[in-house]
Image (spheres, rainbow, N blue to C red):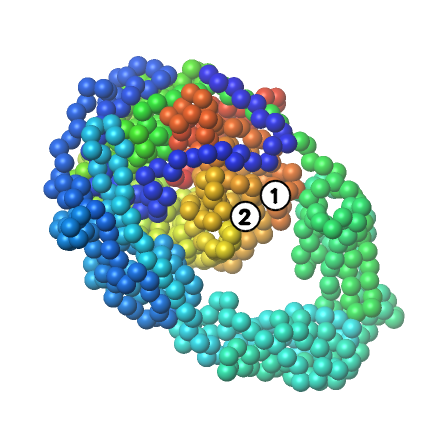
Amino acid sequence: MLSRRPEPSRPSIPGRRRIPISILAGLFAAVVAGACASAGPAGPPSGGPRAGVRGEESEARPLTPEQQAARRVSRIAITPDSVELQVGDSARVRVTALDSAGKAVEGAPLRAFVSGRSAAYDDSSGWLKGLEAGTAILYGVVAVPPARPGAESRSILARAAIRVSPLPVVRIELTDVPDSLYQGTRTRLEAIAFSRVGEREGAPLRWSSSDTAVLAVTDHGLASALAPGKAAVTARSGGTEVTGTVRVVKSPVRSLAVTPASIDTLTGDVVHLTVTARDDRGRPVSGVPVRWSVAGPDGAADVGAYLDESGTFVAERPGLYSVTASAGDRTAVAEISARHRPYRIPMKAVGHGVVHGHSTSDLWAFQGVDGRDYVYTGTHADGAGGDVLYAWDVTDPAKPVITDSVVVDARVVNDIKVNDTRQIAVLTREGASDRKNGIVLLDIRIPAHPKIITSYTQDLTAGVHNTWISGNLVYAVNDGTRAIHIIDISDPLHPKEVGRWEIDRPGKYLHDITIKDGLAYVSYWDDGLIILDVGAGIAGGTPTKPVEVSQLKYRTRWGAETYGNTHHAIRYENYVFVSDEIFGCSECGNGPRGYVHVIDVSDIRHPKEVAYFRVPEAGSHNLWAQDGRLYIAYYQGGLRVVDISGQLRGDLYRQGREIGWFDTASPDAFEPNAAMAWGPQVFRGHIFVSDMNSGLWIVKFARGDATTGASASGAGASGGGS
């Protein structure tokens, strides 16, 4: 057991990280791993007996014809090596695997795909289609199996740059232009631009006013009402324009008052300020545009606070803040005194289990039907290969013991789930040597010794990246169709598909799904968060016939690039917490990036992002939420625990809502001294964390309770991504 106590002030962990096989394997692990499934021997795991574990005596599987062809590949040619096209247009692009003599290698496991949302590539026809303005990269990749048992596989990679130009704007619609404004007030004018195929996001709009003495308007639409009268306002993009009329009237406002005028609070707590405007007789005046501003403690240039147009305020650091509401020449001020939230609570390791021959992937903790506590962990493609599930007895959390394992034909066992009866587990397969992949059902009635019931591969041959179990249904994320396949396992010997759901967009990529209270939260990468009714009664959906309720897409900027990369989403109370997963960006010098978006779903049909948690120089992965706390496996940033009680707005990291941090790096690891936290789960008073390099951790807070002691299915529990 290794106990590590972090310094409370440490903001992030730069660390180092060897990326498994390819950064791109996270997008489609089966592509990179599919031809690399020859298995070498695995070293013995620490923490218990080797029952059922593939050992040193194992032999390499014979190479398939496809793998033999892969070994003859010397390079990949993409012709042309760069492509420019317009949204909606298509171009033919050839991707060819060549040998050392420059001849095409027949039968090689060549895969071609686009990274980025701007284009899509059909590798069966060779047609590339522009989807939206921006840049993307077309990759060709061949995975070459290891030269000998125990050696690492390698990938041959080629790329071509893609630039997609936007369609011209053909129509503009005014969305927020008031009929009238009070003299002396300001407001932001809004409009939406459309191309011939729909809304054109990010189209440049330029605004102007017909009478700047009455209404002055900046290029970007900030309107200032200067004198009574009328003015036409125009929004233009290229040769398209639209015009509206605004009337400026004399302001009746004689006074403003902010409520509350003074308040004491904590950093991170949400304060709602309201303003009342009155005329010279003291009567309330409605429809007055109010501008809010804030001065931070000691007049610092960095205000250190969140303040939105509705008067919602959150302090990021302790001190006295002055918040001003303005309407024309009238102002009112509220004073807010903020105290620091409770500081981080140190965390400590209770137990640690390492599998030296393998990189660890997902985990699932549960109480077996025999009354003992267990954790199942998967394996990833690094090292001896990701073809093993390990069963750990964690009844004594200080001494996790491997009781058995299950070996399958796979390069990645990415995800593991256990059903509510705790009698069946499901593991996913990617990169199988026979390329059947799919899911494997396990009999866990003797949980220390799981046994294979059957494999289900129908239409899942490209691989399954994640699953969710709801009753007798498994919702499987298909790497090939990029759809959710719904599989009935009520007869575990004979699973069958009973439904399917997907979005209709070329180039889509599906990563994960979680379900809670009849709603599914689907992480559709560049298409964002999609919420489905699977029995909640909101939109007429059923468990086998999902119906879309709403969607929220976003882009985040890292260096010069922007990304969607919606990776994992979980529901907790009125929020959905969504993590990004970003590899290979210009700022990814020490490993992945990405952070947690906080989505308000109190109006389920109109989700909106209201807050975020972003650790510097690290990347978010899987999440778990329970009892007012969010647990984040933050890759090289280790385990992070965030206070998510109450309302949430703004930058939760700067507000001091992080209450715990545990460094999952260890010298005793598959890769020593390099954290790569994969997944957290709260179970029976402890926090279980899998780390790709250091294996399984059992941790708790050094003082007070680690959690409320609720089980994985306890009140408010939500999580389980991969």
Q: Which percent across, then down, holds residue 222?
A: 67, 71
Labels in figure, total: 2
Residue lying at the far right in this picture: please name it: 281
Q: Which mark is residue 496?
A: none
Snapshot quadrant of residue 67:
top left
Q: Residues within 10 Å of mark 1 (few under 14, many from 20)?
A: many
Front residue of 178/354: it is 354
Q: Are marks 2 and 1 in contact (CB under 8 Å)?
A: yes
Q: Which percent across, then down, holds residue 575?
A: 53, 47
For residue 570, side relative to residue 260 (left or right): left
Residue lying at the far front in this picture: please name it: 101
Front residue of 285/541: it is 285
Residue type highlighted by circle 1: Leu
Q: Which residue is mark 1?
A: 652
For residue 409, side relative to residue 298 (left or right): left
Q: Residue at x 59, y 71 (%)?
A: 190
Q: Residue at x 82, y 56 (%)?
A: 333
Q: Secondary structure at mark 2?
A: strand
Q: Residue at x 53, y 71 (%)?
A: 204
**Vertical side of 469 occupied by 689: above or below:** above
Q: Which residue is mark 2?
A: 598
Q: Which percent across, then down, holds residue 215?
A: 72, 79
Q: Secondary structure at mark 1?
A: loop
Q: CA distance from mark 2 to mark 1?
A: 10 Å
Front residue of 505/451: it is 505
Q: Give the mark nearer the N terminus: 2 vs 1.
A: 2
State which quarter of the image contains the C terminus: top left
Residue type highlighted by circle 2: Val
Q: Residue at x 35, y 69 (%)?
A: 85
**Vertical side of 526 occupied by 683: above or below:** above
**Vertical side of 592 occupied by 283: above or below:** below
Residue 91 visible in image: yes
